[in-house]
């Protein structure tokens, strides 16, 4: 294994664990596709950041995208709560409208500039080892994306561990949560905020398709095997790692896109687990009791 | 625990994978270029003394290029990395710039003086990256590449210098040929209508009016009024042919043809122009010179018809 391989697998794994931990809660709240929504809805953010700065450097694009990411998740939450829309409808309304605003902004103001998420925001996991942090003496410490992934993972683990009970209760039993003094609204917004920051940072380092898939597929695979939240989180971490590692091996074998291969492996694992369950004729996991 | 067995199996699969194959060291300089045009320029100057790989193959739209695992090892093993710059490579350009801290990385657009670049009217500092369609402008990239090659391999200095001089003469000849050939067309027939704005330098250098349906970004949708304007323009100027590009979808340009037909003006697709990518390797269009010639011939044939 080369150092590059280790860096890529490690970065992908750390990002996928972050995404998976948050994704598990999203899945249980029927908001699994919120990552895809953010991927589209950041467009007006980067256009506005460009219109203000006149620059397409990441320094401007990331804050632009991040603020729209937060706005998107807040709007989804708001429409769901205040307008009484189902979550999928709230997601659909929010991201299509925001994406459309971005398209209009581009065609009106910046039609002559190459400006879209693909060329100014989304990173490429294959290039993670190329962008490194160096000491003043020029010694290579490691890829920047790896440190970003590590920082995000620490924050997300802290968030999930410290807020475990609040997240659990506000996900499954809002009424009980309110009765025991937990602010459901606050914890929903906190979760959504964490999702938008994690996804935008991950988009910038490893690209969109990987992030959108990692938010959904490993938690969904884990959900096939267990309906206990703790076990589900644990299995999500395992599947996140396996997808990243196998995906890298597949990409090397095919000389193909690494992100594509990782997502393919994640999908393959899902099917594998599902088929294994069918073959073993195991009954689907019991419905999760609200407070287990 | 089934998942445990599974993970052990998959882990062993992972660990059994061989380290990436090392390239045979031929003693030649190994250069990695982003687009085919850049690779062709490096090859023209480096000749048999360099080995050049292009990351984006024939027909690949740079906007849609996806890196593979092999691209990473190519970049890591390269002695020299050459790219177009001016944001043609999008975010990858930023990555390459940072790679420049650790290895030789050059943007060919560095050689072009800023006054000669087409700047966006609203946002200064943002330039049109399609510099290769003005042959005289593209020739100013020769010294940049030559200097970079010499810096990496000074023992072959004379060889590189000779080839660079020779190639500069060839490009000068090409530039004159393009200019003279297009003069065959009457001025009001020298109009190129394509799907996206790749030919602005070409238009400026050879006195050709260029109209693109779409902006530079492949995401910028054309407005309804843009479409109506373009249709009216084609009808008013009695232009008979519009062009498609090898790396961009033909769908939008077909809607223009349909619009003209409804107004009783027959327009057809005049042919394929190479814009952001060259033709297949081994064909005449697989080189920069062949690609430019092919575009000019296509234009002459279609616009001069009847």
Image (spheres, helix red, strand yellow):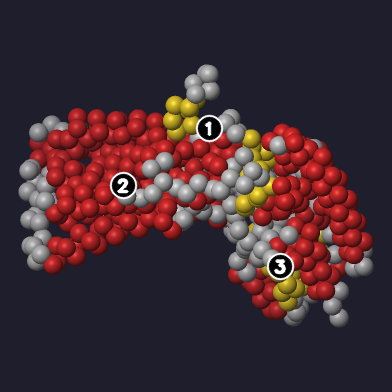
- At a point 28% along the width and 45% down the height, the residue shown is A241
Between disc 3 and disc 1, the foreground one is 3
Of all chains, the one bearing label 3 is: B
Where does label 1 land, which residue? A59
- At a point 31% along the width and 47% down the height, the residue shown is B15
Where does label 3 land, which residue? B283
- At a point 73% along the width and 60% down the height, the residue shown is B287
Q: Is residue A104 left or right of residue A97?
A: right
Q: Is residue B102 left or right of residue A199?
A: right
Q: CA distance from mark 3 to mark 2?
A: 42 Å
Along the viewing direction, whichever of B217 and B155 lies nearer the viewer = B155
Badge 3 or badge 2: first in the primary sequence: 2
Q: Is residue A73 above or below residue A272?
A: above
Q: Quadrant of the N terminus of chain A?
A: top left
Of all chains, the one bearing label 1 is: A
What percent of the width, then of the height, locates residue A120?
A: 54, 43
Of all chains, the one bearing label 2 is: B
- At a point 55% along the width and 39% down the height, the residue shown is B95
Numbered badge on residue B300: none
Along the viewing direction, whichever of A279 and B93 lies nearer the viewer = A279
- Do labels 3 and 2 touch, CB within 8 Å? no
- For the residues tagged 3 and 2, is the chain the same? yes
What percent of the width, then of the height, locates residue A60?
A: 54, 34
């Amino acid at each position: 294994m080369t150092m590059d391989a280790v860096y890529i697998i490690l970065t992908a794994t750390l990002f996928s664990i972050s995404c998976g931990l948050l994704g598990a809660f999203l899945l249980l709240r029927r908001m699994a596709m919120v990552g895809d929504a953010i991927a589209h809805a950041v467009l007006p953010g980067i256009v506005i950041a460009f219109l203000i700065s006149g620059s397409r450097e990441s320094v401007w694009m990331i804050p632009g995208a991040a603020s729209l990411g937060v706005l998107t998740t807040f709007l989804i939450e708001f429409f769901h709560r205040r307008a009484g829309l189902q979550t999928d409808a709230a997601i659909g309304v929010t991201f299509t409208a925001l994406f459309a605003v971005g398209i209009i902004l581009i065609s009106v103001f910046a039609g002559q500039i190459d400006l879209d998420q693909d060329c100014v925001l989304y990173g490429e996991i294959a290039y993670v080892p190329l962008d490194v942090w160096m000491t003043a003496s020029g010694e290579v410490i490691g890829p920047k994306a790896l440190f970003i992934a590590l920082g995000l993972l620490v924050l997300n683990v802290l968030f999930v561990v410290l807020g475990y009970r609040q997240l659990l209760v506000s996900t499954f039993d809002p009424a009980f949560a309110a009765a025991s003094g937990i602010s459901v609204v606050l914890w929903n917004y906190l979760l959504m905020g964490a999702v938008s920051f994690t996804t935008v940072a991950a988009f910038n380092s490893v690209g969109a398709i990987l992030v959108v898939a990692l938010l959904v597929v490993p938690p969904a695979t884990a959900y096939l095997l267990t309906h206990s939240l703790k076990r589900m989180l644990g299995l999500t971490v395992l599947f996140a790692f396996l997808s990243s590692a196998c995906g890298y091996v597949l990409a090397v074998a095919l000389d193909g896109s690494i992100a594509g291969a990782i997502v393919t492996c994640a999908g393959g694992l899902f099917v594998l687990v599902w088929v294994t369950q069918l073959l073993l004729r195991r009954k689907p996991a019991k419905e999760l009791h609200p407070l287990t | 625990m089934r998942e445990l067995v599974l993970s052990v199996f998959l882990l062993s699969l992972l660990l059994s994978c061989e380290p990436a194959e090392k390239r045979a060291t031929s003693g030649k300089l190994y250069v990695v270029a982003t687009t085919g045009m850049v690779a062709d320029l490096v090859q023209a100057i480096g000749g048999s003394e360099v080995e050049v790989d292009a990351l984006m193959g024939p027909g690949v739209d740079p906007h849609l290029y996806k890196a593979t695992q092999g691209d990473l090892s190519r970049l890591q093993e390269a002695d020299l990395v050459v790219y177009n710059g001016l944001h043609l490579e999008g975010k990858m350009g930023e990555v390459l710039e940072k790679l420049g801290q650790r290895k030789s990385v050059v943007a060919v657009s560095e050689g072009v003086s800023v006054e000669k670049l087409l700047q966006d009217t609203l946002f200064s500092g943002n330039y049109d990256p399609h510099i290769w369609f003005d042959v005289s402008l593209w020739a100013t990239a020769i010294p940049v590449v030559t200097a970079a090659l010499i810096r990496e391999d000074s023992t072959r200095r004379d060889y590189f210098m000779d080839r660079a001089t020779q190639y500069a003469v060839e490009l000068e000849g090409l530039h004159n040929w393009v200019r003279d050939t297009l003069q065959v067309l009457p001025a009001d027939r020298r109009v190129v209508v394509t799907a996206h704005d790749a030919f602005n330098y070409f238009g400026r250098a050879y006195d050709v009016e260029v109209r693109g349906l779409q902006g530079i970004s492949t995401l910028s949708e054309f407005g309804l009024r843009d479409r109506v304007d373009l249709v009216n323009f084609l009808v008013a100027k009695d232009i008979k042919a519009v062009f498609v590009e090898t790396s961009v979808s033909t769908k939008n340009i077909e809607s223009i043809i349909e619009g003209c037909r409804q107004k009783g003006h027959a327009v057809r697709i005049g042919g394929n122009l190479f814009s952001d990518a060259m033709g297949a390797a081994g064909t005449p269009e697989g080189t920069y010179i062949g690609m430019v010639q092919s575009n000019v011939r296509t234009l002459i044939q279609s616009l001069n018809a009847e």
